[in-house]
Amino acid sequence: MNDSNRRLAAAAGLAFAGYAVLGWRAGVGGGSGTGWLLAAQAAGWIALALAWAGLDKTAAGTDGAPVTRLLVAGALVFRLCGLTVAPGWEDDYHRHLWDGWLTLRTGSPYGIAPLDWFGSDAVPERMQAVLDGINHPDTPTPYGPVAQAWSAGAAILGAGKLWVFKAGLVLAEIAAWRVAWRLGGDRALLLLSWCPLAVTEIAFAGHVDALVLAAVMAALGGAAKARPGAVGAWLALAVATKAYALLLAPFFLWRGGRRSMVVFGATLLLAYAPWIATTVAAGRPAGAVGGGEGVTAMAAGFEFNSTGFALAARLFGDGPARWVAGGCLLAGWAGLAWRWRGRGDDAPIPGAALVGWWALWSPVFHPWYALLAVPFWVLRPSGWATGLLIALPLSYQHGLALGGADFRHPAWVRPAELAVVAAGALISRWKRRVV
């Protein structure tokens, strides 16, 4: 093993130590674990920086290289630390496990809230704890058809078993690693597979945003090979997993042309049609398919980790602020689209910038939403985007995690997040000037 590989192995050891301790703490329980989460994130980011600094520039496509094998081995070990434990800082996985079981039980998870099953004798004992752990049980599921198919598939293999569900998500990640490596070599592979946010939000917390990440990465791979049909299909699967992927749709479809648009529409139809049929057969409205009720409830009344919206709410009140924030989001999106079109046909899609602008104005922005930016970040790294990925886990320091009664954040959280993003941007700018 040469010096470069030894440095890489040492960096992997540092990250492993952080994730192993986090997994151990999650396994023994006791508290939210947000402090241990932030410590593991810090270890992971330091390790990634050390690996990046010591990594030789490698052209895409050198199959079987020792460095590539070390990167993949380290990434897999990181994820094994979290695969069999339940995160103390996050509980969304209960909803996925419940939706999977409910699909097998009734044919569809749509159009009925978990609250309607409280006290029902039809819920087996192994699923009762899952049902009790769902947050906002009065709200129907907000997840799209692809996410529900994934949950149902995991339930077939083991209903209520979190590790089965998460193992499938990690497999989707691995597929994305392959695409990133083909497009950007070992450096892109390093950023994607060692990204601490991806490790903790997928292998530990079990968020289906891993499927969005993988689908968008595949769409970028299809675009690089001039396969507009593949681009349309993968983009549709991303949107059918979580609707926020629509932020990217016009950019991909404009560049892919008519073929991308037709395949996109056809794939969406194929993704939704079976669920419409099973939902109607279960005696529920077809309009419930896709999670619209849950998404609407979030858009109308929820707030978490907001920035621009929080400022607007102070000035105008909650209701008007949602319109103000929505208008600012739309205006910024249009500005980015106009600027992108003006740069010519070879200009990269500003995916990370779109997600950053969304994070600034959305009333709700959970850390795992930023996984949508990761495929773009790994191919075109930037300081501010790195800062955003580093900063977002600070939002887990909310009231409930700190012994309070709700999800409100201490006054220091938002300024700290903004400071980290700004620091990333300034460091990146300084490095460019020095070079």
Image (cartoon, rainbow, N blue to C red):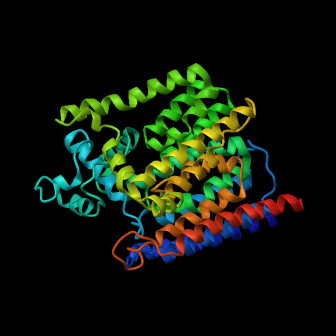
- 240 vs 287, left or right, is right
Of residues 258 and 151, the one nearer the viewer is 258
Quadrant holding the N terminus: bottom right
Tell which residue pokes out farthest to the left in this image.
Answer: 121
Of residues 274 and 19, the one nearer the viewer is 274
Residue in the picture at 50% in, 41% down? 245
- 434 vs 286, left or right, is right
Q: Is residue 1 visible?
A: no
Tell which residue pokes out farthest to the right in this image.
Answer: 435
Residue in the picture at 64% in, 69% down? 419
Q: Position of residue 246 (x, y in %)?
A: 50, 38
Q: Position of residue 433 (x, y in %)?
A: 87, 59
Of residues 90 and 43, the one nearer the viewer is 90
Residue in the picture at 61% in, 72% down? 42
Q: Is residue 94 visible?
A: yes
Tell which residue pokes out farthest to the front in this image.
Answer: 316
Of residues 428 and 120, the one nearer the viewer is 428
Q: Position of residue 126 (x, y in %)?
A: 22, 60
Quadrant holding the C terminus: bottom right
Residue in the picture at 63% in, 53% down? 192
The answer to whether 282 is drawn above or below residue 432 in the figure is above
The answer to whether 145 is drawn above or below residue 412 in the figure is above
Number of numbered discs on residues: 0
- 207 vs 53, left or right, is left
- 299 vs 397, left or right, is left
